[in-house]
Amino acid sequence: MIIVISGPSGSGKTTVAKILSERLKLRFVSAGQLFREMAASLGKDIIEMNKSAEKKFDIDKLIDKKILDEAKKGNVIIESHIAGWLLSGIADYTIYLWANIEERAKRISIRDKISYEEALIKIMEREQSHYFRFWKYYGIDLLDLTPFDMVINTSNVDINRIVNIILAYIGKNTSV
């Protein structure tokens, strides 16, 4: 089984993907983590790395190859901003998580221990980079959610309920 969880920063995709991987006993692969590790190895923060990726397609291509290789092995949950588009037709289930920008900024400020305002600015910078980059290199319109089997607004929904909705959708009744 291959399950893809996509969505913008702060939507809950990593948390949901980790819980699902534990519950379904599937491997967990995070494109975001791969991207952060690559940034750290180059001495860059996430915004600097996004700016570099805008200029050099090899950065995304390397991560995308890793994601595709992991998908081919099967029995995996892949968390990624764009895997839903990249693995459409390969993945068994593609799920997009979304939340309003205010809620995402609140979550990121708590997670990263930064101010709400700083989180909001980082979200806007990253999303601007993502929209530009993913359209330029892949022709992906991040507003076109047609590759997804399910879209969930996570703004006001408990994380366990989101997991249970997904489990019910894929036919696995192992509620929390």
Image: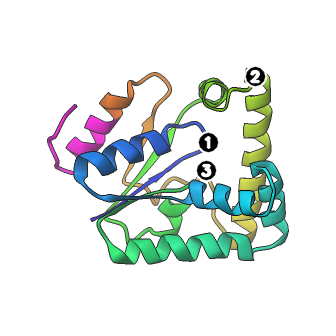
**111 is higher (above) or lower (below) than 50:** above
Q: The magenta stretch spans which residues? A: 163-176
Figure quadrant of the N terminus: bottom left
What residue is pinned by disc 1? 9
Tag 2: amino acid:
Ser
Residue positioned 83% across, 58% down in the render? 51
Please state which of the two labelled residues, at mark 2 or mark 3, is closer to the viewer. Answer: 2
Q: Is residue 157 above or below residue 85?
A: above
CA separation, marks 2 and 1? 16 Å
User: Residue at left 75%, top 74%?
Assistant: 57
Q: Is residue 135 left or right of residue 90?
A: right
Dot in front, 3 or 1: 1
Residue 78 percent coordinates (x, y)? 44, 59
x, y percentage for residue 36? Answer: 66, 55
Which residue carries the number 2 mark? 115
Residue type (three-letter) at the residue carrying disc 1: Ser
Residue 138 to residue 125: above or below: below
Q: Which mark is residue 143?
A: 3
- x, y percentage for residue 121? 80, 34
